[in-house]
Image (cartoon, helix red, strand yellow):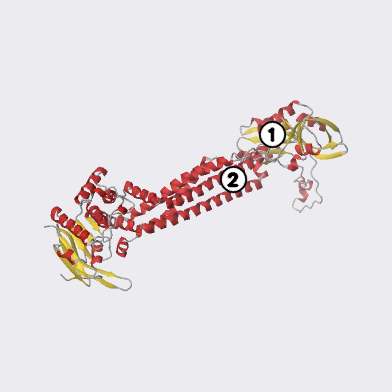
């Protein structure tokens, strides 16, 4: 039977009389856990920010018509050569329309699905921005500005003007910030654009758009759906892309597959489109954890060392305790509880340190052109990290204390007493 | 009179550096209230015998009986319990826990035994301190009291659980004659007034002569 009050009293007295060593050991844990919390909060904060940068703008499912060669060539339908090898030279892509057939009913169907948060139309058009005799190639996308703002955070990327202003102005254009800079244009100015066919239209700049990706900002502009349909001379049902946002991103792949089968369109889900992006996130997380675990292992060795030293110093005490009736197990528990106390105190202080440091970092200004919505460094204050931190502190001190405590358990009191 | 401690044909060998027969067929009994000393030259095995009797050394052949019960071959946890409850120990060097106060040192074995409440244990500890006339030291750190006082604290600690027997390994060996005399007087009184059994290993002939019985050892044998 183990009498915990006595054992904890002895452990406490040992720790208090050796307060310097105890503090150093506890500080090792504090530093390890503090660094872990700070690092993991900061890194996952950055990761989440980068993810959002991509995810917020990217539709969960992107539906469009792909230009591609027919999978079935006419020769395949001819049953007299069914057992022969067909060789067809210089296959051309099939002539198909850019617009999505029956786009409006399709959108209505999608919007009624319980999994869908919203399905909104886009029209992509190649245009030229005209400045005197200079023509700059670019993309004009027709959008429903208010819906884009609701589902894909368009507002975060408008650095001047607003989505409402675009919605309210039939000849309005939301100009990419790169083009505006090239052409020295400001909100309220007029810009002329020309279609591939050569028709020229004047549009009024109602806002500036900055995605954070320079190459995109140098070509991309937005206008209303109707405006673009008018520029292209197309009817109101002319829609080239449908972007779908789901309530649950996990549904993206099966849903995309289903849409492809059902409507004979190309539907790309977000994970397929951004596979490399996912890999990057995983690798960054891996690095974070590798560094944190290294820190904690170093702290663990510190505790191991100090407990080992403590046991050498307390050799006499151990012998006396055993002589007056403490069992090996009791002695082991004394040193184990010392390790655990160091781990617990150091761990809790480490959590506080980590919280303090990450709070501090979250107030440091972080302004970059690429990320218009971010004002300070992003920190992820996830309570899970704190749980993992304290568990790791206790685990590592447990293992660091185990071997020295095992040694103390096995010390033969006779040898110590007679050795004097 | 009842027998407190009995050794039956105890043999012990040292394996290192070479096999060596340290204790050869040791047989003796200690009755209740008897004050026995073991004498012999250095290396005759008297300390080795004492550590076997104290249950701390378990590598021997033969049987050991405490209060007529065999305690050889018991589990180490049970032996710890026996040491805690039935055996009080006093060493040559003043083995106190330096970081604790005198009172805490004395209370420790009783706290470990856990048979009494903390208040009772403290009362017992003060009683033992009074018995040894050192109650004024109770709250001092063990490292701050003098050598003679330390030995008396160690005796008080040995007494706290009212053991069946007190064992000492040269308890006066490291003390000046005045303090040594003091310790002897305390042992004598414990024996006479409380009928405690004592088994003391000593080099000191004056000390041994004043005990009830001397066990003389030579080359691992009891010769008288």
Q: Do labels 1 and 2 share a chain?
A: yes
Residue B33 occupies which quadrant of the picture? bottom left
Task: Read off the residue under disc 1.
Answer: A154
Residue A34 in picture, x, y percent from top left: 52, 46
Closer to the camera, A83 or A52?
A52
Residue A264 appears in the figure:
no
Residue at (25, 45) in percent of width and height: B122
Chain letter of disc 2? A
For mark 1, give the secondary structure: helix
Q: Distance between the residues labelled 1 and 2?
A: 26 Å
Dot in front, 1 or 2:
2
Task: Read off the residue under disc 2.
Answer: A43
Which residue extends farthest right? A133
> Looking at the image, is A52 positioned above or below residue B76?
above
Closer to the camera, A168 or B27?
B27
Residue B182 in picture, x, y percent from top left: 19, 57
Chain letter of disc 1? A
Closer to the camera, A31 or A134?
A31
Residue B102 in picture, x, y percent from top left: 28, 50
How many residues crowd mark 2 within 10 Å: few (<14), some (14–19), many (20+)? many
Image quarter hosting the N terminus of chain B: bottom left
Closer to the camera, A351 or B3?
A351
Residue A405 occupies which quadrant of the picture? bottom left
Residue B182 appears in the figure:
yes
> Looking at the image, is A236 positioned above or below residue B197?
above
């Amino acid at each position: 039977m183990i009498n915990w009050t006595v054992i904890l009293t002895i452990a406490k007295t040992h720790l208090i009389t050796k307060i310097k060593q105890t503090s150093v050991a506890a500080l090792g844990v504090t530093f390890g856990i503090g660094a872990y919390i700070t690092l993991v909060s900061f890194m996952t904060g950055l990761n989440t920010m980068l993810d959002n940068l991509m995810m917020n703008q990217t539709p969960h499912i992107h539906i469009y018509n792909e230009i591609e060669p027919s999978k079935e060539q006419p020769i395949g339908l001819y049953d007299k050569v069914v057992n022969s090898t067909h060789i067809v030279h210089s296959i051309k892509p099939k002539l198909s329309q850019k617009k999505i057939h029956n786009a409006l009913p399709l959108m209505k169907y999608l919007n009624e699905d319980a999994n869908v948060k919203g399905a909104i139309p886009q029209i992509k058009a190649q245009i030229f921005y005209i400045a005197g005799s200079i023509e700059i190639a670019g993309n004009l996308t027709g959008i429903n500005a208010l819906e884009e703002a609701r589902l894909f955070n368009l507002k975060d990327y408008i650095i001047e003007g607003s989505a409402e202003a675009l919605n309210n102005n039939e000849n309005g254009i939301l100009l990419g910030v790169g083009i505006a800079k090239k052409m020295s244009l400001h909100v309220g100015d007029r810009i002329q654009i020309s279609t591939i066919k050569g028709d020229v239209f004047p549009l009024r700049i109602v806002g500036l758009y900055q995605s954070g990706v320079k190459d995109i900002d140098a070509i991309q502009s937005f206008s209303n759906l109707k405006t673009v349909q008018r520029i292209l001379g197309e009817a109101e049902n002319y829609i080239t892309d449908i972007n779908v946002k789901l309530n649950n991103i996990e549904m993206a792949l099966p849903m995309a597959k289903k849409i492809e089968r059902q409507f004979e369109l190309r539907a790309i889900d977000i994970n397929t489109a951004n596979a490399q992006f996912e890999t990057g996130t995983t690798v960054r997380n891996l690095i974070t954890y590798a560094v944190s675990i290294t820190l904690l292992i170093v702290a663990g060795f510190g505790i191991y060392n100090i407990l080992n030293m403590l046991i050498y110093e307390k050799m006499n005490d151990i012998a006396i305790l055993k002589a007056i009736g403490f069992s090996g197990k009791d002695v082991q528990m004394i040193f184990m509880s010392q390790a655990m106390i160091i781990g617990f105190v150091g761990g809790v202080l480490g959590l506080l340190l980590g919280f303090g440091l990450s709070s501090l970092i979250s107030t440091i200004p972080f302004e970059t052109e690429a990320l218009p919505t971010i004002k300070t460094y992003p920190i992820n204050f996830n309570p899970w990290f704190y749980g993992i931190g304290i568990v790791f502190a206790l685990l590592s001190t447990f293992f660091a204390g185990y071997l020295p405590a095992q040694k103390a358990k096995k010390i033969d009191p006779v040898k110590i007493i007679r050795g004097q | 009179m009842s027998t407190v401690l009995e050794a039956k044909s105890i043999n012990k060998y040292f394996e290192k550096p070479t096999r060596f027969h340290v204790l050869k067929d040791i047989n003796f009994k200690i009755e209740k209230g008897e004050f026995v000393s073991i004498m012999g030259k250095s290396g005759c095995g008297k300390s080795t015998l004492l550590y076997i009797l104290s249950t701390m050394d378990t590598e021997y052949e033969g049987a050991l009986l405490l209060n007529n019960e065999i305690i050889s071959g018991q589990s180490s946890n049970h032996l710890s319990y026996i040491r805690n409850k039935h055996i009080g120990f006093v060493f040559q060097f003043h083995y106190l826990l330096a970081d604790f106060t005198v009172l805490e040192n004395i209370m420790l074995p009783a706290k470990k035994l856990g048979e009494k409440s903390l208040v009772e244990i403290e009362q017992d500890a003060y009683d033992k301190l009074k018995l040894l006339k050192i109650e004024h030291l109770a709250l001092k750190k063990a490292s701050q009291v003098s050598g003679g006082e330390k030995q008396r604290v160690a005796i008080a600690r040995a007494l706290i659980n009212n053991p069946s027997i007190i064992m000492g390994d040269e308890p006066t060996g490291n003390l000046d004659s005045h303090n040594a005399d003091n310790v002897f007087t305390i042992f004598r009184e414990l024996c006479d007034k409380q009928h405690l059994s004592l088994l003391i290993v000593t080099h000191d002939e004056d000390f041994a002569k004043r005990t009830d019985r001397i066990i003389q050892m030579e080359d691992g044998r009891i010769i008288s």
